Amino acid sequence: MHAARFVLVVLVCTLALACSGERQKAQSNVLLIMTDDLPVSVLEENLGSYPNIRALMQRGVTFENSFVTQPVCCPSRATSLTGMYSHNHHVGQPPEGGGEMDFRTLEGEALPVIMQRAGYDTAYIGKYLNGYDGEHRPPGWNLWGGVEPSRMATFGVDGRNAEGVTHTEVFGKDTASFIREERGEEPFFVYLATIAPHEPPAYPARYDSLFSNEQAPRNAAFNEKDVSDKPRWVRKHPLENAQRIEAEDDIYRDMARSMKDVDDMVSVLVGALGEQGDLDNTYVILTSDNGFHFGTHRLPQAKWTAYEEDIRVPLVVAGPGVPEGQAREQMVLNNDLAPTTADWAGTEMPATDGRSFAELLTGDSPRAWRKRFEVEGAYHPGYRRPPYQAVRTERWLYVDYETPAQELYDLQADPHELENVAKKKPGVVERLSGQLEDLRACEGQRCREAEGG
């Protein structure tokens, strides 16, 4: 697999294990692993250090063009649970938005409720939507283990408790316990949301010396010298100095160590599935709520932008009927996670802007697929970046800000988004503006029509 194309990894476990004497399930289980702020490059550049994630990739399908439609934690997770664009679910990011409180009006028709109706035993374990108060129990979950990181008093800043155990290890053990002991006779759906590798990255002390020579990606966009063609909110950032770069490299190394902890967790989960005879009947999905950038176009480490580093995410899927070790080039979105999961359960989401990618996994000739999608961003106070809406096609990224600013990048000729050609390509801007207009307020089937395919 070409490293630069590794973006979305959807793992579907196809390892066949003997299940003699065990009940054969009519519906497959689903285990969705949602990491937090995972830069694609961490896996691209260090895959050999993550043997369990690599094994899942070898047993499943990797999506090379996987994206999120708003690259920030809370809105992205709301999309994964509803299949809706942000302009339809209206869930914001605290403190600027309402966060988890905004999502409560949608809970009654969100994915866990749909899966329960389809006969599934459901469990949520790990980080929930930002702003969660720790008391409300959302409907649809048989086992509720959702947490808000700021309320996890038993874990220190390093993500370890008094025994030195990380929250990743705890979430993994809790999920394995559910798989082994706590679920009923029904098929199960588990949404496992790690805090890792979110800053400050957590990892066991035994990994302190790993990845000591790693650096944040030094591609052409890193600390870009000439940003005169970028919007004002980008231009105001000075070149990063050596001290700032060193600090970012330290964070990047810790993120790589944190993903080693996630890799260990994958081993625990696969082991539990194997012990129960469930591995060959379980779809395992590994992805992230958004990407993450370090020094891209001089920007301090974060997400929030429509640039590739932020909207691209790994996605691997392994499971029943999924061919081993293959890749797919179609553009898939976090909008697609909920309708795909429902599809595997033999049901469908009542209201979704996404589409099931189940048929892409089989290798059969799929129906026409999307050609474009919308990216959305609310006002960012730290960057003072104005709100934007963008359209990402197979070739172009066009960004329209609420202030009089536009960006246009030819991703075939300029994959690192160095030259803003909005003023040089008025015809392309006009065409993409029309496509974006169709996407801005689309809903349901109209979104799928506006995306093309």
Image: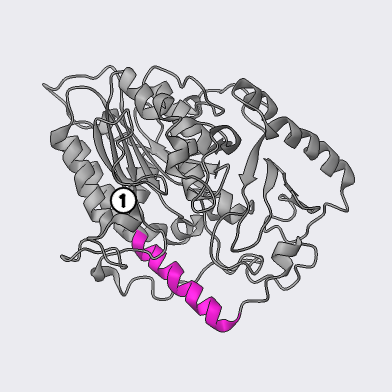
Q: Predominant secondary structure in magenta?
A: helix
Which sits in the foreground, 432 or 108? Answer: 108
Which sits in the foreground, 237 or 56? Answer: 237
- Looking at the image, residue 343 sits to the left or right of residue 137; the answer is right
Crowd tier of the residue under label 1, counting other residues whose Cα lies within 10 Å: few below 14, some 14–19, many 20 or above:
many
Which residue sits at x=18%, y=30%? Answer: 183
Q: Quadrant of residue 33?
A: top left
Magenta stretch: includes residue 257: yes
Q: Position of residue 309 (x, y in %)?
A: 58, 56
Region rendered in magenta: 241-258
Q: Position of residue 443 (x, y in %)?
A: 62, 26
Magenta stretch: includes residue 309: no
Q: Position of residue 215 (x, y in %)?
A: 49, 72
In the rendered image, the quadrant that contains the C terminus is top right
Q: Amino acid at mark 1?
A: Asn
- Number of marks in picture: 1
Q: Position of residue 325 (x, y in %)?
A: 42, 40
Q: Is residue 424 above or below residue 352?
A: below
Q: Quadrant of residue 234?
A: bottom right
Query: In this orientation, does residue 362 appear?
Result: no
Which residue sits at x=66%, y=66%? Answer: 297
Residue position marked by numbered label 1 in the rendering: 52
Which residue sits at x=45%, y=68%? Answer: 252
Colouring of the image: one colour
Q: Quadrant of residue 372?
A: top right
Query: In this orientation, does residue 129 appear?
Result: yes
Q: Is residue 26 above or below residue 99?
A: above
Q: Is residue 256 above or below residue 432?
A: below
